[in-house]
Image (cartoon, rainbow, N blue to C red):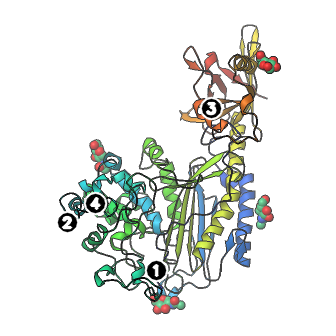
Amino acid sequence: MVLISHFVVALATLCSISFAQTDQVLQGAAFDPPSHLSTNKIIQTAISNITNSLREAIYTGTSRFGSFDSSTTSFSLTAVSQLDSSPIIDFHHTSGSLNVSAGSTSKVTGDSVYRIGSISKLFTVYALLLNNGTKYWNRPVTDFVPELRKAVPSSPYKYLSVIDAVQWDQVTVGALASQLSGIGRDCNSADLAVQDFPWTQLGLPSLAPQDIPICGINDDQLPCSRKEYFASYIQRHAVFPPYSKAMYSNGAYRVLAYVLEAITGSSYEDVVEDEIFQPLGMKHSSVLPPTAKGKGVIPDGDAGWNRAYGDEIATGGLLSSTNDLIEFGRAIFSNKQLSPMETLRWMKPKSFTASPSLFIGAPWEIVRTRSGITTGRLVDLYTKSGSVGAYQSLIILVPDYQVTLAVLAAGPDASAAAQTATETTIQTLLPALEEAAKEQACNRLCGEYFASIGASSSSLVVTVDDRPGLLIKSWTHQGHDLIAAGQAYANATRGGQIQSVRLFPSGLQTHNRAAYRAIFQRVVPEDDESSVRKVFDPAAGTWGMPDQLMYGGIAVDEFVFHVDAGKRSAAVEPRVLRAVYQRLEM
Ligand SMILES: *[C@@H]1O[C@H](CO)[C@@H](O)[C@H](O)[C@H]1NC(C)=O
Ligand SMILES: *[C@@H]1O[C@H](CO)[C@@H](O)[C@H](O)[C@H]1NC(C)=O
Ligand SMILES: *[C@@H]1O[C@H](CO)[C@@H](O)[C@H](O)[C@H]1NC(C)=O
Ligand SMILES: *[C@@H]1O[C@H](CO)[C@@H](O)[C@H](O)[C@H]1NC(C)=O
């Protein structure tokens, strides 16, 4: 039986979460990302819980996230913060059925090589971005791939309707990269006609010989050559109009590699090796399986380790280790190759899915959870998963904490093992990261700030509580209560009741100053009936609040802390007051 799961997108099923927002917060991190995690008490406690839970799952073969046979399936899990050198967690399980005579390692580590399946797609887009890919984003693929150019106007297929044929001149480079092309998911690979199963006995028609694939990622077949591939692919029917909705397509990424090759004049393999793996020091990542003994994780049986991928490599053929994948995450967060602007532009959703907890980027699978998993503010996980042969893979980048988590598994239960490892880790780690971030932010910024101007004094007290953001507990300026001033304005403008004033990092900072924006969290009478279901979630309006109220051109919500990296702040400027408050040392 062929491995039906080729490249299937396997998303971890998260607990059902509520999307009605209660807190009015800014989107994104509520605090600066935490650092020095390996010596942080909150993180240490979380990691020992995770490690114990993983050991228990391996020992018993069950967990609340699934069951897997740890005697046949191995896995690796490594996470790191961009701000730290040592990993937060580095956990490996070696099953008893690795094929050492086939060259497998007998002890899995962070350098052990796995097939990463569709995580390859992340490298394909990254390679494109390194080569000015966004310049070509809105160009049709027909500008780069002659076979598809020929498949458009004056071709033998021109009589075909939009239902029968892809309008290739409307499929852009960006649509391919963002899974918005609407083109066929696969071509030849995993076709039922070549699987060892009695389809005709079960009622499907017998096929003409020319309809049965002769190449593809199938048992006993070789990958299709470029010529064979396009001969079949241009006959596949369109699935959706381009840009109408996200749809997982492996073919899109094979075509994207041809675009990359046309732009760079180099082979896909050379671009990935020379421009990514080599400069980022990803020594355990490659386009072909390492031949040296003891490098790879090769389960017994037909794991697909040595399968040839041909030009399907860009969609699912690369190999890597958890150490290398977290290095890749670190490179993204530290802007090693892409500028901050290019990175932020890339790490955004491009479309929705049918689920409110999954958005699609290029090719990010953006999973929305909460800082406390079922409670707290929304946290976006930028993920890419993969599944090929006996291998299951997942990389998760969490911009809010600058943390990368890589999970690789190999064996008959790779999918269940990866899901167990991922859920066990993320559900304990995320709340701990939020706590650690809050604690560190408070160590640096909480306290009383004070200014004495003439006879009157001014003070601002910053603290934290169990909600997101730094809380302004009190604020008086030259004897005037400024939160009451805000309330008076709210009263005059039907602005409701101010519940709290909270500061969120804006992302704008220099070596010694960091800008924050305040959210005046309010309850407006007509929004107060939280039991009444509203289509327009009142808290969703928060994004319109920053910078709204100005006084002489300076917004009332702008605060700048004077702080040297990692140190306690020395002062805060509520900029609307044109004043600087010094920290009151206790
Ligand atoms: C880990 O923490 C969870 C939640 O607090 C708890 O239910 C579980 O028992 C802990 N597991 C271990 C192995 O410590
Ligand atoms: C990207 O484009 C810029 C300006 O057009 C050019 O200077 C640069 O060499 C290009 N870089 C690559 C990698 O193609
Ligand atoms: C181990 O690999 C060798 C060489 O590829 C193969 O002949 C053998 O069948 C494999 N053993 C098992 C148990 O899968
Ligand atoms: C705002 O209005 C509320 C209720 O109408 C009132 O109790 C409160 O004193 C007012 N606050 C200010 C600062 O005007």
Quadrant of residue 392 within the rendered picture: bottom right
- Secondary structure at badge 3 equals loop
Give the residue at mark 3. 563
Q: CA distance from mark 4 to mark 2?
A: 27 Å
Give the residue at mark 4. 261
Q: Nearer the viewer, residue 558 or 514?
A: 558
The quadrant of the rendering that contains the C terminus is: top right
- Secondary structure at badge 2 equals loop
Q: Residue at position x 37%, y 61% from top?
A: 183
Q: Earlier in the sequence, mark 3 or mark 4?
A: 4
Q: Residue at position x 57%, y 19% from top?
A: 554
Instruction: State left or right for residue 58 relative to residue 398.
Output: right
Q: CA distance from mark 3 to mark 4?
A: 47 Å
Q: Could you tell me if the residues under marks 4 and 2 are in contact, i.e. CB atoms within 8 Å?
A: no
- Compared with 531, 188 (above or below) is below
Q: CA distance from mark 4 to mark 1?
A: 26 Å
Please name the amino acid that badge 1 sits on: Gly
Task: Tell us which disc is closer to us: 3 or 2.
Answer: 2
- Secondary structure at badge 4 equals helix
- Compared with 285, 432 (above or below) is above
Task: Tell us which disc is closer to us: 3 or 1.
Answer: 1
Give the residue at mark 2. 156
Instruction: State left or right for residue 473 relative to residue 567.
Output: right
Give the residue at mark 1. 304
Q: Could you tell me if the residues under marks 1 and 2 are in contact, i.e. CB atoms within 8 Å?
A: no
**Viewer can see residue 452:** yes
Q: Earlier in the sequence, mark 4 or mark 2?
A: 2
Q: Earlier in the sequence, mark 3 or mark 2?
A: 2
